[in-house]
Amino acid sequence: MLAVYIHIPFCERKCNYCAFSSFACIDKEKDRYISSLLNEIENFDFKNFEFNSNLLCVNRTKTTSYEVDTIYIGGGTPSLLTIEDLTKILNKIKEKFKISSNCEISIECNPNSLTYEKACGYKNLGINRLSLGIQSLDDEELKFIGRLHNSSQALDAIDMVKKAGIKNISCDMIIGLQNQTPETFKNQLETLIKKDIKHISTYMLQIEDGTPLAKFASHNADFLPSEDENAFVYKQASAFLEEHGFKRYEVSNFAKLGYESRHNFKYWTGENYIGFGLSAHSYIDGIRYANANNFADYYSRKLALKETLSKQELIEEHLMLGLRCARGVDLEYLQKLGKNIENNENFKYFLEKNVIFKVKNKFFLNPDYYEVNNYVIVKLMS
Ligand SMILES: C[S@@+](CC[C@H](N)C(=O)[O-])C[C@H]1O[C@@H](n2cnc3c(N)ncnc32)[C@H](O)[C@@H]1O
Ligand code: SF4
């Protein structure tokens, strides 16, 4: 089964913190972009992709099944597109690939560009999961990070989506904003829970180089909460969400039972995925590809990256993904790739201190240590 990602690189305006590949140029670029994207999908051919022979160790062979069971339209801001544009894109995917009858089709939306008519259009197109970039329900915080919506627009957007008949709604929230305390954040989560939101992502604010936020933070060191304060908010929020029936299935992702993102789960479990569009990444049979990150190079199909993972990189990837999510790390898989991690001194130490725990042939990160997952991963790789 395959995952397909489609990147829509347009935003109405860049948010102050965001370094994702998106640009405020929809009027100038949209028509050419959509036609190039349709052309990229149409010309996709598995025959053009190689097989990483390092995967033979783990009994993997070249992919022959082309059925797609998850599609993710992300950005940027896909809700800036018209229903006609989205129809063309999804029809092209359906022409090209066999689509499972229970395919998860997600779209990322910003509250300010979503309308009830668009939400109904998504429903008619078979889009069955909608991810809303709420970020915060504090108007001062929203303004500070440069969002174009306020909290009441965010809540209205949720109501619109529900009224249009899409039940599987996810909300993105950011930890690390200026007014935040464990209490204020929990109150915001509670508001979302009362709206029967099924999935919540809580991202730790990253200060990305080159963004207006990075510039601001370099002159106002104490304006934002410290790492320790953020870790405390995260811990309290995790406990709160779990008390309310959400399961943490990845460091930043919480879902009611049966509402885990099947698409994102494929990224975290090392399955094949194909990305279409500017800067989109693909991972096919142990080889990573990335499309160019600027329009001119994307239109001429220049790749920004093609990387065949070595055995060491496959090991690192499996370890990193397995520890970040509830799937755990398969000891046998690591062994087949030549890594006997049970001999590693740090592994023994973490096991003894209950930082990791073993169940049959797998090991898992103790959820109490999720916020230091990067440290554990680095130690286990050494
Ligand atoms: C690629 S964005 C697309 C969603 C949509 N455009 C929106 O912003 O509403 C996905 C999510 O990444 C998160 N994000 C982007 N930049 C971030 C940063 N620097 N730190 C933390 N989270 C970030 C935001 O929560 C955002 O909703
Ligand atoms: S709307 Fe989303 S993708 Fe666009 S700049 Fe803001 S966070 Fe980034």
Image (cartoon, rainbow, N blue to C red):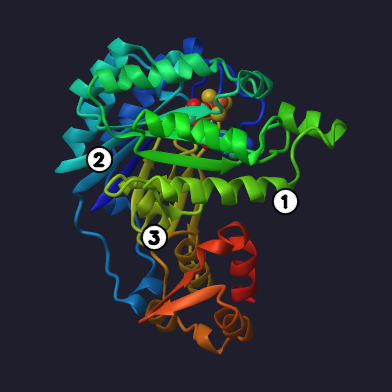
How packed mark 1 is, by other alpha carbons closer than 10 Å (few <14, some 14-19, many 20 or more), is few
Q: Where does label 1 land, which residue?
A: 228
Residue that numbered label 3 is attached to = 270
Does residue 279 appear anywhere in the picture? yes
Q: Which residue is drawn at 26% across and 22% down?
A: 122
- Marks 2/1: CA–CA distance: 37 Å
Q: Which of marks 1 and 3 is nearer the N terminus?
A: 1
Q: Residue at x 35, y 82 (%)?
A: 360
Q: Position of residue 2 (x, y in %)?
A: 27, 50
Comes first in the chain, label 2 or label 1: 2
Q: Please, is residue 49 above or below residue 195 in the view?
A: below
* Residue 32 sits above or below residue 340 on the image: above
Tell me which amino acid carries mark 3.
Gly
6 or 307: nearer the viewer: 6
Between disc 2 and disc 3, the foreground one is: 2
Which residue is under mark 2? Answer: 104
